[in-house]
Amino acid sequence: MPVSKKTAFLVASASLLCLSLTAPALADDKPKDPSPRPTAPMSKLGGELLGKPGTQVRLAGGAPVLPKKLTGRSWLVADAESGEVLAAHNAHWRLPPASTLKMLFADTVLPKFPKTTTHKVAAADLAGMGAGSSLVGVKEDQTYSVHDLWLGVFLRSGNDAVHVLSAMNGGKKQTVRDMQEHAEELQALDTHVVSPDGYDEPGQVSSAYDLTLFARSGLQKKDFREYAATARAKFPGEAKKGKKRPTFEIQNTNRLLTGDYDLDAYRGIAGVKNGNTTNAGATFTGVAERDGRVLLVTVMNPSAKEHDAVYKETAKLLDWGFAASGKTEPVGNLVRPKSESGEEGAAGGSGGKDGGASGGDDTEVQKADSASSGGVGTALGIAGGVLVLLAAAAFLVNRRWPLPDLVRRRPRP
């Protein structure tokens, strides 16, 4: 190489080295999200931002940042009463739901039978349960009340109890049809039901958004609220001739309700439902009340290997949601059922400024100035006033869930 060219090459190399040493590390300015992403477009129902991949949140002044080390493939934080979605991550990603689908089962079937109704279990009632199913201990040729069976569904996630109630409802196929119709009424359009118990089946999917809709709808029913908030109960054992029928204690598998060896019961928790299967991983929807505010959080399939990760991430999101109260702009809304909403769902919900906001694929936080926050607050206030005028008085009263009473009745761990 000629000396002049060699000199020029060395000078250029030195210049590039200096630039590399002094330039900002742009890759570090925006942390990469290693978690899996949806491969198919997601629904925008409830707001434009809810259809975007990644984390969506709009923080106003003084709002806490979202918790670190959230590993759920999908999650959502919502105000249970207003329906505002405070933050979400892949909200409409269609994923296996596991036993959280039992919330839809209960919301669909629970109103059909008085709790005092009794049923003698036949062998056919228990047929077709998947291998390794969670069971409460329902036995053939034994008689159970509907109340007993629902305790088995909510506390032990008993697929045996689900199958018996499905048999009472006309069988598995009829129950699946009923659940799918109810999901469509709730505008839970990410959901495809194959089995009423949530057991892994090809094509059976839901989303964090839909599971939150199921919880919100179910919690408007008094019996649903009471079963979801029950920590422990007695369940009938096997009756033997000439002897008093024994009972045994069952405990709710919702670890935020009962606690665990490395996890305290969450203050203010009042349900709702957990699940865990091979395909779905761990899933959970929880509802909690604090200082008069009720939040719903759904977390699906966290990748963290930590014990009880789904509950710990839910607790973090609940803590954040209560701390961020009044300091965020909604990124979307939980739509109302078709019979309540008219054409609202087709228009993408009433997400305030969602349609014009851009959260980006990797949004961690999106600051909103106080003037914008005030404008949204005014808009939401007007929307709330319209809702009051349009909705039936009984519906509005029923939306004020008596969760604090349920919490106080729950035995302390």
Image (cartoon, rainbow, N blue to C red):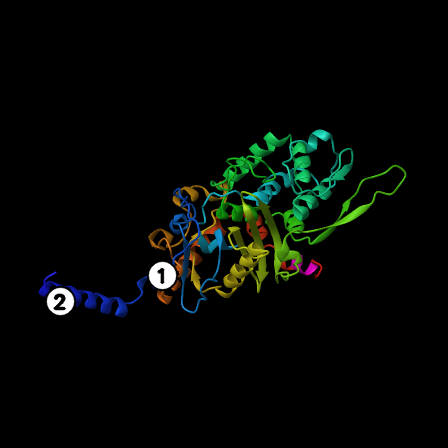
Residue 268 left/right relative to 185? right
The front one of 402 and 131 is 131
Residue 237 left/right relative to 376? right
Q: Which residue is mark 1?
A: 30
Specify start and end residues of the magenta stretch as a single range.
Answer: 405-409
- Secondary structure of residue under mark 2: helix
Q: CA distance from mark 2 to mark 1?
A: 38 Å
Tell me where residue 278 appears, x and y as whole percent: 56, 43
Residue 134's quadrant in the figure? top right
The front one of 196 and 32 is 32
Residue 406 colored in magenta in the image: yes
Q: Which residue is mark 2?
A: 7
Tell me where residue 46 appears, x and y as whole percent: 43, 48
Q: Residue at x 56, y 57 (%)?
A: 306
Residue type, numbered disc 2? Thr
Reply above or below: 261 against 104.
Answer: below
